[in-house]
Amino acid sequence: MLHNDRGFTLWLTGLPGAGKSTLAKAARDDLMGPGGRIEILDGDEVRTKLGQGLGFSKKDRDTSVRRIGFVARLLSCNGVVVIVAAISPYRDVRDEVRRDHEGTFVEVFVDCPLQELIRRDTKGLYAKALRGEIPHFTGVSDPYESPLSPDIHIRSDVETVAESRAKIVQWLKRHGFV
Amino acid sequence: MLHNDRGFTLWLTGLPGAGKSTLAKAARDDLMGPGGRIEILDGDEVRTKLGQGLGFSKKDRDTSVRRIGFVARLLSCNGVVVIVAAISPYRDVRDEVRRDHEGTFVEVFVDCPLQELIRRDTKGLYAKALRGEIPHFTGVSDPYESPLSPDIHIRSDVETVAESRAKIVQWLKRHGFV
């Protein structure tokens, strides 16, 4: 357990099924301090609370990501460690959220090749999307813009969750976040 | 300056112009601890961040209030003192937000008679609303449901801001919030 007095946002971006939520939960266990000031904002969950009426156009996805960014910023500037797990497919809005965070934003690219995600397809969503049954499915019928220089690059196709979370904690320690 | 380790939400509800935002800022100065974990969520400001596309029907106003409630809850359960200043005209949704807070919600009714608000009308909005130029204006052309038993009842027509903020701090001390 690590103690944090200083809030920051660990932002996990990646294709659907790449392991963002799983890694978010694992990282929470590492980063939970005695004060318990840590919060996971999961894109799918937050959408039900803050995104009623929003669809999957670029404009609506951008609005959704900006809202998550706004809440993450509110929390982190009040000393909370925030872990965001959200596809957040567009580079420009991720960068905008990073700028708003003024140095307390850590971008984590949860990277898994599309072919591997289609092979695993634990929820059967890629098969549906490939059959055209899910419109605007990121990676299949909607774009995903990979980070050009993420702070942390996770390779969830070849790393175990334990290895990935260790990588995150090491990076945060090395850069003075924890 | 008072120190708070325990977060809670101080929810200021009342008609437009009743003094919610002014009182929120004054109360912040009283409640700001050394850690600085305090946040004002102003209804008008939050609407620009989380409410694009929402109008002023009951359904949309309820959605807006629920979103503020969701964010306030996220912050307060992470040790932040949250001061909300929002008209939040409907009783049922305020009560719903209260329930979600599980004992960390303090309802403050910022009460000023409509006739006095129309007389003051510092922003000229009541005059416009009375001329029919602003549709859905709470108190004139849209309902406001007063709290039936607010935790704190502020009478901004007869109290000074200093008296009102003292009333709030005394209540919070007496009930162990600070």
Image (spheres, coloured by chain):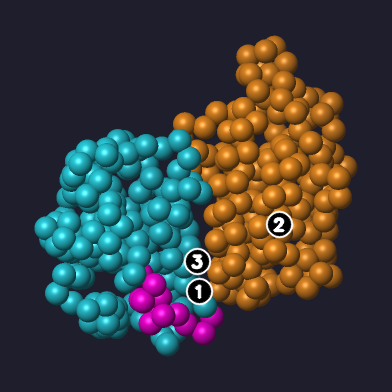
Chain colours: A cyan, B orange
Q: At numbered mark 2, what does the secondary structure look like: helix, strand or loop? A: helix
Q: Is residue B126 magenta?
A: no
Give the residue at x 69% y 44%: B93
Q: Looking at the picture, how far across and down is residue B15, in whole percent?
A: 74, 35
Stretch of the chain drawn in magenta? A24-35
Residue where numbered disc 2 is placed: B99
Q: Main secondary structure of the magenta part?
A: helix
As shown in the figure, which amino acid type bears the numbered disc 3? Answer: Asn
Of tags 3 and 1, the one toward the viewer is 1
Q: Earlier in the sequence, mark 3 or mark 1?
A: 1
Residue where numbered disc 1 is placed: A37
Circles 3 and 1 in contact, beta carbons < 8 Å: no
Q: Looking at the picture, how far across and down is residue B50, in whole percent?
A: 48, 43
Q: Looking at the picture, how far across and down is residue B92, in whole percent?
A: 74, 43
User: Subunit of mark 1?
Assistant: A
Quarter of the image that includes the C terminus of chain B: bottom right
Circles 2 and 1 in contact, beta carbons < 8 Å: no
Q: Looking at the picture, how far across and down is residue A138, in whole percent?
A: 23, 47
Q: Is residue B15 above or below residue A20?
A: above
Residue where numbered disc 3 is placed: A78
Quarter of the image that includes the N terminus of chain B: bottom right
Judge the density around disc 1: few (<14), some (14-19), many (≥20) Cα neighbours within 10 Å: many
Of tags 3 and 2, the one toward the viewer is 2
